[in-house]
Image: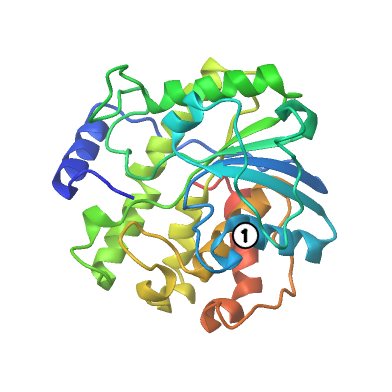
Amino acid sequence: MTCPPARLATAAAALWITLGAPALAEIPPAAARDEARIYFFGNSLVHHLTDSDETTVPHWMALMARQDGREFGADGRWGFPRNFATELPPHTNWEFAEVEKVWNSYRQPFGAAGFDTIIFNPENFIQYDRADQPYNGDNPDRATPLGATMNVVDWVMENAEAPQFLIYEGWADLHPFAREFPPTAPEMAQYYAHASGTYARWYDDYVARLAALRPDAGVALIPVGRVMAQVLSEEPLVQIPAEVLYSDRSPHGTETVYLLAAMITYASIYGAPPPAGMQFPDTIDPTFAAAYDQTAERIWQILQDGAR
């Protein structure tokens, strides 16, 4: 992903804070359920295209659902909010060996698929200004992240049976905090502080505005970025080097990060902790694999406490 220069991002974020960003909102726990049929408007923070499905959130969610005796099906596409808003009806271009497909977009209209959840994933490099402010760069229509999102919400509400609309808070851009890859430990500490602070407040503001403007859409947040920052800053996961978790400064994740993101998403969707007793391939960092059950309990505790 490309991003604005580090100085611009940092200065703009600081200005946004001084202009009165809202306090962190409490995130209520999701109601428990045993089935999810999800359409993802996503990018590489959900599905990083590599030679393996293990760098995708849906892959790990499917395995966790199977372990837990729950139903999971999903489809999705890549893009950013402006793409999603101007390319409706959506299409589906994601395929996973372990994930049951829900929608045949060549034979069915979107509403016939029976999606009960929409997950919408904005870019991670636009958080230097509020979501109701126009995108920088080539933007003759003065489109905003909030406006693009509302276009999609409106289309979904008109064309599907009232699915819940969830905002996926992916992890933050690393470029403004690291001069090169891999980053140093102090740089990662600063990065995680940003993810839990300014970056999280951007999402709280975005979701609050969207929910106020579209109160019937079931808008809520999946707080991946802030929960990830918290558990990766604590023992024992703080011992895992950054280069084991990320592959660049965008930052695309390794298999371990997509597993962690899936754990947070799973708990947010099903209203239940990630299942215990999972077995992992050697692509998952051994420290993380050994701490999986402990991490699952910690994620559930954070979500129950409101993911502040």
Residue 294's spot in the image, x, y percent?
A: 62, 72
Left or right of residue 215, residue 100 in this image: right
Residue 86's spot in the image, x, y percent?
A: 48, 24
Amino acid on which disc 1 is placed: Met
Residue found 33% across the figure and 30% down from its top? 21
SS class of the residue under badge 1?
Answer: helix
Q: Nearer the viewer, residue 130 or 113?
A: 113
* Whether residue 64 is visible: yes
147 relative to 137, above or below: above
Left or right of residue 26, residue 123 in this image: left
Q: How was this image coloured?
A: rainbow
Left or right of residue 267, residue 151 in this image: left
When asked about the image quadrant of residue 33, the answer is: top right
195 relative to 248, above or below: above
Give the residue at mark 1: 263
Q: Nearer the viewer, residue 222 or 75?
A: 75
Left or right of residue 38, residue 122 in this image: left
Residue found 63% across the figure and 80% down from its top? 281
* Whether residue 301 is visible: no
Check disc 1: other Cα within 10 Å, few if <14, some if 14-19, many if 20+.
many
Residue 41's spot in the image, x, y percent?
A: 55, 39
When asked about the image quadrant of residue 107, the answer is: top right
